[in-house]
Amino acid sequence: MGNGSVKPKHSKNPDGHPGNLTASTLRSRVTELERELRRKDAEIQEREYHLKELREQLSKQTVAIAELTEELQNKCIQLNKLQDVVHLQGGSLPRASSDKVPLEVQRKTSGLVSLHSRRGAKAGVSAEPTTRTYDLNKPPEFSFEKARVRKDSSEKKLITDALNKNQFLKRLDPQQIKDMVECMYGRNYQQGSYIIKQGEPGNHIFVLAEGRLEVFQGEKLLSSIPMWTTFGELAILYNCTRTASVKAITNVKTWALDREVFQNIMRRTAQARDEQYRNFLRSVSLLKNLPEDKLTKIIDCLEVEYYDKGDYIIREGEEGSTFFILAKGKVKVTQSTEGHDQPQLIKTLQKGEYFGEKALISEDVRSANIIAEENDVACLVIDRETFNQTVGTFEELQKYLEGYVANLNRDDEKRHAKRSMSSWKLSKALSLEMIQLKEKVARFSSSSPFQNLEIIATLGVGGFGRVKVKNENVAFAMKCIRKKHIVDTKQQEHVYSEKKILEELCSPFIVKLYRTFKDNKYVYMLLEACLGGELIIRTNFCLFLPEAFDYLHRLGIIYRDLKPENLILDAEGYLKLVDFGFAKKIGSGQKTWTFYVGPNVRFWLFSSPPFSGIDQMMTYNLILKGIEKMDFPRKITRRPEDLIRRLCRQNPTERLGNLKNGINDIKKHRQTEECEGLIKSPSLPSPTSYHRPILSGPTDHSYFDKYPPERGVPPDELSGWDKDF
């Protein structure tokens, strides 16, 4: 072995034993491996079967979770309604309170029925009390310069970034964000103090600048808030209560903004932008003669596009369908000319000038180049398709203008009557009926109406108290509102507005006002009695609504308080729209700048809202995602789903009912057109005969709940705000 030879290694069999493998050993080993393979195959099959079972269980659980989520959302809606009733019965406003006046009927020495809460009635949450002294002609006062707070540039940048990161605020215009930053002010808190307390009303939005904050629900810690993060944002949208507490773990510094300032900023910037765009359009020869309502629609369609220096906005020779108004910056116009290889400068356009207007009329081949002269050039744009869908083609506008000008010298009432729905044919009969009843009640004492009236029953707080004329076979509804409560909640303007609007209206689908009264404790409205009950569950009556709202919109009136409690049936089963406390007359083509639910909602919201979540934050997240991301319940069929989706487009200019044909597009939708002929006029047999109320007489109030009286008498209110009531 010393010669460097190497001893070979001993071979081993698969069991680790040395030695040569025999054929029988190999056969035995193969058999063993085959047996092991079959065992493994069986084990795999068993696991695959188990996995299949788990997948089926997961699928079933997913469906169950979806169903439970839908049920939970419905329960949340019902819980909110019950909470509202509990709050009302407890003598306080609902947790998401509004400027809605609780219409209360209290016991007087003469026997007037008492205050009570109508079961299931839900107060509005869209408006807030007016904060100024009652004066119909005095606008809200807001000074942006006084609201500004000095900050250095680095602080402004950090606050701006924090606001822009917030999902509810990042969609605001840059100018609105800038104004918010300017008006935010510093608020410091000591360690252990609460910036926000759960259950308390909220009025501020905050940005954390220094320190550490933690969020609690009850005693449970939910999260901490990073530096330069926005929180409390729901409070600036409406006057809700806080859903969680925010506690200072260290000394902290925040930047805060009040809701009233935020809403004034939104109103101020929107009004300024609206006026600027309107002035731009008035300078366009093609559009300057259009009436206000058409201009308003065009303004709503305008979108902003930005260009950097050297960008071509329009290229010579290309087909174009877009009209441009220069909102910011400068552009140059160049054109090809004989004798020059390159396009030559023709002129320069500045802010307020426009180009491409021919594209709104027909196919347009661009005759020049439009090139941005500087960075951040902003253009307002509208394309021909949007223009035609929203306000009509150029030929349609010409015909419209001919009719519009021909009507300018006619009486406004006659003009509305000519163009209103067919049920207006009954206006003479309705007017005659009103005149007869008004003559009857005109004899009543202005300060003591109950000398001539007999109390029959209370129909509901938030609705009507009903009374009966003595010795006459006529029933009325008396709306009794405590004057002290009106003053305390600063609702004088809304009450006067309701009175004036109802005095103007005469429609078969709107409750009629016969007369108003007042004394030291109340103001009263004597109205038509509708005893067929409330439209809480009878959703098939919704097709009456387009007629009522079409009539209101023709008069330039917006309603703003649609809910089942405000839809009541008369003795024949016809729908009546009641309670005009939120209504406002703004005129044709005008806007209001307060925070209310969009008008389109009234055409589809007849059950559970599609955006309901288990809390307010989830609800807002669903709204921001848009209707396109919503899955509809299986019980909603294709036609109503299509109607709702088209009514809820995120871009208002694309919504059904906001196009050139207006409300007629809704009436002609397949979901509503089959019933359209039934609701044109109450002179036809009741379309709701299968739900027609069965009443024993003109004072039968069996469709309304019974309510107990309330102890106590309201105090006198003698400030004199109601002198013209």
Image: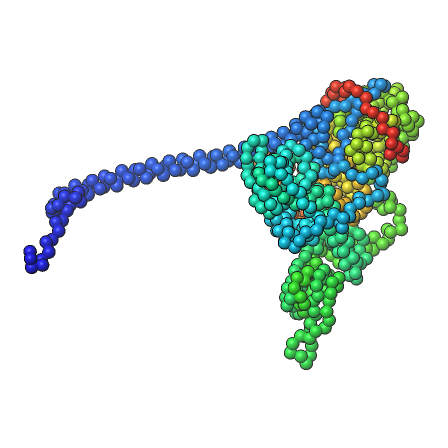
- Closer to the camera in the image, 191 or 92: 191
Task: Work out which residue is located at the far right of the displayed protein and give it.
Answer: 443
Pick the residue in front: 389 or 78. 78
Which residue corresponds to the image point at 88% horizontal and 25% vertical from the top-left?
A: 449
Q: Nearer the viewer, residue 104 or 27?
A: 104
Tell me residue 365's x, y (percent).
68, 67
Q: Quadrant of the C terminus?
A: top right
Residue 71 shows up from this direction: no
Q: Is residue 134 visible?
A: yes
Left or right? Give the position of 203 relative to 398.
Answer: left
How far from the left and from the top, in percent, is residue 713? 81, 21
Q: Residue at x 75, y 34 (%)?
A: 100
Q: Quadrant of the N terminus?
A: bottom left
- Residue 112 at what x, y percent from top left? 82, 21
The residue at 83%/29% (across/down) is: 483
Residue at 53 percent across and 36 percent down: it is 66
* Quadrant in the rendering for residue 225: top right
Q: Is residue 9 left or right of residue 320?
A: left
